[in-house]
Image (cartoon, rainbow, N blue to C red):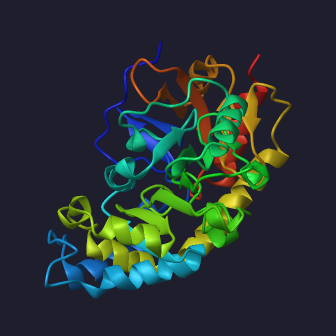
Amino acid sequence: MPKPPLHLQHLPGRTLRQGQDEYLYFSGTGYLGTAHDPIIQSNLQQAIAQYGLHFGGSRLSNIRLAVFDEAEIYLATYCGAESALLLSSGSLGGQLIRQVLYGLGNFLPSPDFHPALWQHDLPFLGTWEQWQEEVRAKTQMEGPPLFLLSNSLDPLQVKRHDFSWLATLDIQRELVLILDDSHGFGISGREGSGVLSLLDLPTSIPCLVLSSMGKAFGVPAGLVLGPEKWLRLLRQSPFFGGASPPPPAFVQAFLDSQSRYAELRERLFANLRFFKKGLPSAPQLHYMDDYPVFLCQNHELVEHFLASKIIASSFPYPTASSPVFTRIVLSSLHTEQDLKELQRCLELYP
């Protein structure tokens, strides 16, 4: 049974305060620590002076801000996509995809696809391997386009999905892969550009990538990447035209902070290498080589951490009745001393 949540009056960074106590904080999704970075904060302050706090007009208005188009061109090039579309959140991007594409074909969701894409379909109830067999069977049948919905990686179970098997399919209908890369974008792939740089798909299988920019990059925005054919449909939707864009100051600060993101990414992976090098024999942890999240197989570690003034991520997801996932999350903010303390705590676990 998870403990009641802590209600804070400040944003946690490498630590958080609760009453008179200070805890090391190994939770959250701010992998690059951007919310506390003074250089990015300075870039944002300059951008706020230019654009103000928010722009609530439609992207289809007769008055438009060039920064959105500039950012979409940059993001498409950075990620290796034909086109890019900015929205106010990743969840809105998921809903936009559902609104526009739902009547154009059949959806086949994987076991762990994101709730932003839930509607009439719920996650596949079998294993990942069983879902692959379902995909194989469905693609051999003629019919309308088949949209495969999946996460690029599972941040809860801490595993990256392999899609190379798609190249072996006998495809008798149009097939489109739709991936949520929210937990990989900014840290995975070429220079943090995400899953598109890691995929090796046949040219016959287009890929749409949905991502939150609010995790690694700390930007309150969402992103959809993919072929212009499909993104044109999203832009033409009243669901897109009726929504406010992300705050333009954050988008401008994102463009102005690229060299800083690279520095923070290197710092994050230096922390990851340092932590893993000194990690004690810990069969209770599951992790990937290039990802700063460690799954704790034993939920009792949470209480052990708390006794040493350490807070890890531990809560049910995606609903209050879902299983609890307990994880250690590293960020660019952590110091070597923080990581040594976490290593020491794991060594002392019985």
Q: Nearer the viewer, residue 27 or 340?
A: 27
**Residue 235 x %, y %:** 31, 70
Residue 319 in the figure: left or right of residue 261 = left
Residue 23 visible from this viewpoint: yes
**Residue 21 x %, y %:** 43, 33
> Is residue 152 depicted above or below 226 in this figure?
above
> Is residue 167 depicted above or below 193 in this figure?
above
Which residue is most to the front? 142
**Residue 175 x %, y %:** 58, 54
Which residue is most to the top? 1
Q: Nearer the viewer, residue 329 or 72?
A: 72
Residue 235 in the figure: left or right of residue 133 = left
**Residue 211 x %, y %:** 47, 57
Q: Quadrant of the C terminus?
A: top right
Residue 344 in the figure: left or right of residue 59 = right
Kindly indicate the quadrant of the structure image that contains residue 31.
bottom right
**Number of numbered tags placed on the structure image:** 0
Residue 42 visible from this viewpoint: no
Residue at 55% across / 31% down in the picture?
Answer: 309
Residue at 82% across / 44% down in the picture?
Answer: 278
Q: Nearer the viewer, residue 150 or 328?
A: 150
Kindly indicate the quadrant of the structure image that contains residue 242.
bottom left
